[in-house]
């Protein structure tokens, strides 16, 4: 019998929240390049911790930020904090980065940051309607030496082959919202920089990557109340409801 796996907030290694908005009409990178650059400059002045550098072309518009380890300026991780996709803008908030970065210190106010950035975006790029909002929460839990097989199958073997990983997608729906949960097995690696300048990566433990996407079921122009409802529904599932769900899924047969 596979061993049960219990997850808690202390097991969280990576925690990222994304707000994706489907808009209409779509944005042309080429035609709106000037307005997009104005949006970036304005956001850089009011949210410099998230809007540090931009990559803009006729095909894409992405913003990045560097997060540094508190006690070592040489150690950093670069992450995307804004991405304009073909469907619309995606605002990204890395609430916790992998070691050695640790907490990014924006966990307490990311909702306020999103409200401010969303308002600035639609002011800079007028004439668009929001049709769908998705709050996507991506979390990686470390499980140590324990493989996460119980999340994917009760049978841990096929003939003489042993189950070593898996992926599961579940979709739930109520009268207002879609809930999509993706459960994936990952390996946590540690990187070591050798004296010759080469970086060696070696697996150190197993992990479980959870993606929870909550969005409005009906596609129509959204009012502010609709947007807040999606946010409230998504946040009501974290952490207690999601941890309880995962506890049942990772339990013994």
Image (cartoon, grey):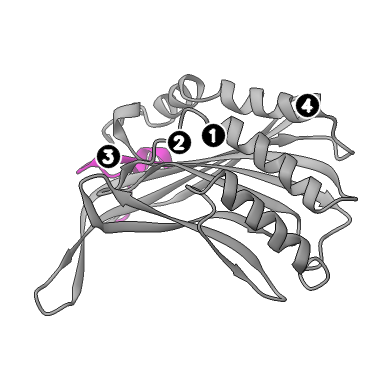
Mark 4 falls on what kind of element? loop
Q: Earlier in the sequence, mark 1 or mark 4?
A: 1
* C-alpha distance separating marks 3 and 4: 34 Å
Q: Give coordinates of residue 105: x percent, y percent.
A: 39, 36
**Labels 1 & 3 near each other (Cβ < 8 A):** no
Q: Is residue 150 magenta?
A: yes
Q: Mark 3 or mark 4, which has the lower sequence index?
A: 3
Number of on-image labels: 4
Q: Which residue is tagged 2?
A: 106
Left or right, 145 with respect to 16, comes to left
Real-space CA distance between mark 3 and mark 2, rounded to the nearest whole angstrom: 25 Å
Which residue does the numbered mark 3 point to in the structure image? 143
Give the magenta-colored segment's residue range. Answer: 140-160
How far across and how far down the image is residue 166, in percent? Answer: 42, 51
Image point 55% across, 45% down: which residue? 47
- Give the crowd class for mark 3: few <14, some 14-19, many >=20 residues within 10 Å: many
Residue 253 lies, in percent from the top left, at 36, 29
Q: Quadrant of the N terminus?
A: top left
Identify the residue at horizontal 51%, vertical 21% (top origin).
241
Residue bearing mark 1? 110
Could you tell whether 29 is left or right of 95 in the image? right
Position of 161 compared to 21: left or right?
Answer: left
Q: Is 129 a magenta residue? A: no
- The residue positioned farthest toward the left in the image shown: 195
Contact (Cβ within 8 Å) of mark 1 with mark 2: yes
Badge 1 vs badge 4, beta-carbon distance below 8 Å: no
Of all residues shown, which one is farthest toward the bottom?
Answer: 196
Of labels 1 and 3, the one closer to you? 1
Q: Which residue is mark 4?
A: 176
Q: How far is disc 2 from disc 4 in space, using C-alphas?
A: 29 Å
């Amino acid at each position: 019998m596979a061993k049960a796996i219990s997850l808690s907030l202390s097991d969280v290694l990576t925690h990222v929240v994304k707000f994706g908005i489907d808009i209409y009409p779509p944005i042309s990178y080429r035609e709106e390049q000037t307005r997009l650059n104005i949006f970036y400059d304005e956001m850089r002045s009011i949210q410099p911790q998230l809007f540090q550098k931009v990559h803009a072309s006729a095909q894409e518009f992405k913003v990045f930020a560097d997060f540094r380890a508190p006690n070592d300026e040489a150690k950093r991780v670069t992450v995307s904090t804004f991405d304009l996709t073909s469907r619309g803008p995606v605002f990204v908030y890395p609430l916790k980065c992998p070691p050695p970065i640790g907490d990014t210190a924006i966990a307490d106010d990311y909702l306020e940051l999103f409200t401010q950035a969303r308002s600035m975006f639609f002011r800079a790029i007028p004439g668009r309607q929001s049709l769908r909002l998705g709050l996507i929460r991506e979390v990686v839990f470390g499980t140590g030496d324990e493989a996460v097989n119980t999340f994917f199958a009760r049978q841990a073997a096929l003939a003489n082959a042993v189950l070593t990983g898996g992926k599961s997608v579940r979709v739930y729906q109520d009268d207002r919202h879609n809930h999509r949960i993706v459960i994936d097995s990952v390996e946590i690696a540690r990187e070591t920089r050798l004296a010759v300048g080469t970086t060696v990566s070696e697996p150190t433990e197993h992990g479980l990557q959870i993606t929870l996407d909550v969005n409005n079921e009906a596609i129509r122009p959204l009012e502010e109340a609709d947007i807040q409802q999606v946010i409230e529904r998504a946040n009501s599932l974290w952490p207690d409801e999601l941890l309880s769900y995962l506890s049942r899924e990772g339990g013994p047969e």
